[in-house]
Image (cartoon, helix red, strand yellow):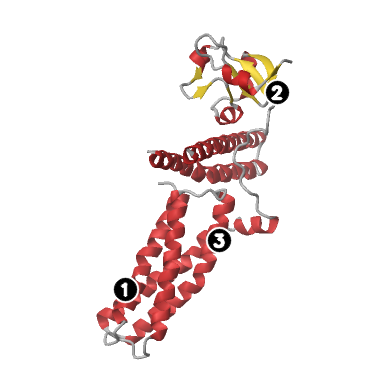
Amino acid sequence: MAGEEVKRIEELIEVILRSIPKEREARNLYRQTAARAPNEMARLLFERLSEQEAVHEQKLRAVLELLRAEKREIESR
Amino acid sequence: MRSIDGDELEGGDGVEGRPALVAVEGRVYDVSASRMWADGKHMKAHAAGRDLTLELQAAPHGPEVLERVEQVGELAEPGAPARATQFPEPPALLARVLALHPHPVSVHFPIALCTTAALFVLLALIFGIPSLERAALYNLGLGVLAAPAAILTGLLSWRYNYGGVWTPIFRRKTALSVLLLLLAAVALTLRLALPESFGPEAPLHWVYAVLVLAHAPTVAAIGFLGGNITFPR
């Protein structure tokens, strides 16, 4: 039973882990694009998108920590 | 501001008329009056009477929701602040190297060379041409030489891009990489121990051939797992 719970959590951890580098990549891409934007409107748009990706990454890392703590707790029972 | 200890916070579970208290970054809030905290539960997932600093960081809303509830005190012993998982930052030079994507670049070599070695061994078995078997040996040797770079860059990528967190897909990829190295080590040792006039008459000929053929599905499986980690489905 505990093994199944750990497996379920590990699957979620894996989804989060695989998503974080993608959020980082998108943030960097939007940031670089904002720096090269041809006009103010485009610059603001890409800066906003970059900030949103940074928030996504932060939330994913928080969820990751919660899941890892839950896994540790189950394993220590 | 009133000091609230861990026991008082724990007692504020919002059940049976007790107040619903939650702590965030050392501050304690009374959420009893909030309709989002009926019976001390929020969204059927978060219970009152606890420190929810990390949960709030993971929430779809921001900390602005706390402006709608009353702060009633501060934690007497706030302890270490809860933090989201931090990924290690590579040294500057290594960061520049990793930006060149060395793992996806380097994995092509062992994948291609080991698969080609298997193909040449198969052709040598079918047509009985010694030069094909020799070509397989050269490809296998080069594949083995290329493997450490692929493994090292893979480990670095895992550590810095994925925080070094150990999950089933990384476990399977590592196990298959170890299997590949073992297959290569045994196959090469065997091949070098075999006589120069290598052919079906040699007693270990078939063992060697199977070992080399086994490289192809092994590298394909490693590549498949790598693709699963990186590429969208």
Chain identity of mark 1: B
**Mark 3 to mark 2 CA distance (whole Å):** 47 Å
Q: Residue at x 42, y 61 (%)?
A: B176
Label 1: which residue? Answer: B210
Badge 2 marks a residue whose secondary structure is loop
* B102 relative position to A12: left or right: right
Q: What's the mark number on residue B153?
A: 3
Q: Are marks 1 and 3 on the same chain?
A: yes
* Three-letter code for the amino acid on which mark 1 is drawn: Val
Query: How far is disc 1 from disc 3 in space, using C-alphas?
Result: 29 Å
| Residue nearer the viewer, B17 or B145 | B17
- Residue B220 seen anywhere in this rendered image of the structure: yes
The residue under the point 56% across, 29% down is B55
Label 3–label 2 contact, CB within 8 A = no
Q: Of the residues under marks 1 and 3, which one precedes in the sequence?
A: 3
Determine whether the residue tagged by mark 1 lies in a helix, strand or loop: helix
Which label's residue is closer to the chain start, 3 or 2? 2
State how far apart marks 1 and 2 are (Cα).
68 Å
**If the image is split into quadrants, where does the N terminus of chain B sit?**
top right
Q: Residue shown at 67%/43% (left/top)?
A: A35
Residue B195 is situated, as x and y percent measured from the top left of the image, at 36, 89
Q: What's the mark number on residue B76? A: 2
Marked residue chain, label 3:
B
Number of residues whose C-alpha sits closer than 10 Å to that of mark 1, classed few (under 14), some (14–19) or many (20 or more): some
Q: Toward the viewer: A52 or A64?
A: A64
